[in-house]
Amino acid sequence: MFFTIFAKGLNIALISLYLRPKLAYFIEYGMAKKSSSTSKSKVKYSKETYKYWFESMLLMRRFEEKAGQLYGQQKIRGFCHLYIGQEACAAGAITALEKEDKWITAYRCHAQPLGLGTDPGAIMAELFGKATGTTKGKGGSMHIFDKSKNFAGGHAIVGAQIPMGLGLGFAEKYLGTKNLSICFMGDGAVRQGAFHESLNLAMLYKTPVIFVIENNGYAMGTSVKRSSNVDELYKLGESYDIPSFPVDAMNVEEVHEAVKEAAERARKGDGPTLLEFRTYRYKGHSMSDPQKYRTKEEVEEYKQRDPIEQVRATILENSILSEDDIKGIEAEVKQKVADAVKFAEESPWPEGEDAFKDVYVEDDYPFVRE
């Protein structure tokens, strides 16, 4: 069955019913436009900020590219969900928030801790299932966790992190701090009842939490158009009177600005914000995803708007760093990833008795009574 759809004055004919909802979504909201990274970009932030964005996003990209290779070699097993293409979502949010703010996300959870400063070796070791991993080899790819960076972990149950993110924010309000929590979720998670319950309570109690929908258009493998009557997902927050906005999350500057504004609102006591990060993952939902639901041409369109290349262009066009500086960063990142792999490969496996540890509250827990 074929038909014609009209979007932005273009007559796109003979699109199959299977592809229509996907392409209509991307065309309607301008997500498939080619990159403007080759045009002159104005500098909005400090040299250090642009350097951080480039270096951190490049580390996320190279780390996960290596993880994908190692998965193919069966050195990493189980589930593995890559963030490649979505790096600006993490990097832009990190520069907009404070050190004591709390983070929580779903199972695509390698990038945020890398950007926050978690040791890449510990993350890689966790992917390997080694005892030196962030969760001692017990969590794997979907359960990276780092209390020292206020990263409350990746969570595998779809939408389970949303009420937890609300709780992290409520705890800060209860304790009287000016900190907040930022809670990431995929576009598929907004179908969960916990999402709506959390938004309702967040606004009711003016909780300092930023809800972020990382909308890559497909959830696990079904487009937003085919699974939701409301396809501009930020509008879901408006039904709870939550300030809600769409964000071009292929652009790290726009991510930073949106999160900074939301953070200011939360710290003033005005409550939550819902941000729809319109982003795109170049890889499948997981390493086992054949990606039959989209075309190679569509993926290539998005690569023309690559967030790392946009920052690289801004840096070079405005002489923030030189070509040699860029090459130096690339070499450093490559070495960090190589060191992480070496650390993981040389780390020990957990012992059998470790299966019985960390199951119940340990004796050193501060609220255990005699």
Image (cartoon, rainbow, N blue to C red):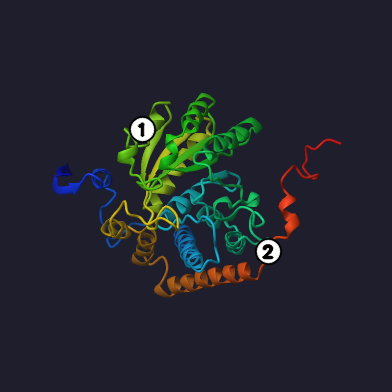
Q: Secondary structure at mark 2?
A: loop
User: Of all residues shown, which one is farthest toward the bottom?
Assistant: 324
Q: In the visual, does 362 lie left or right of 160?
A: right
- Residue 196: % across, % down: 46, 29
- Residue 9: % across, % down: 14, 44
Q: Return the residue nearer the eye: 219 or 258.
A: 219
User: Of all residues shown, which one is farthest toward the top?
Assistant: 204
Quadrant of the rendering where the N terminus is positioned? top left
Q: Is residue 35 visible?
A: no
What residue appears at the point 50 percent right and 69 percent down from the top-left corner?
73
Q: Is residue 284 visible?
A: yes
What residue appears at the point 35 percent right and 55 percent down from the top-left corner?
291
Q: Which mark is residue 235?
A: 1
Q: Nearer the viewer, mark 1 or mark 2?
A: 2
Q: Return the residue nearer the eye: 169 or 146.
A: 146
Amino acid at pointer 2: Trp
Q: Which residue is mark 2?
A: 349
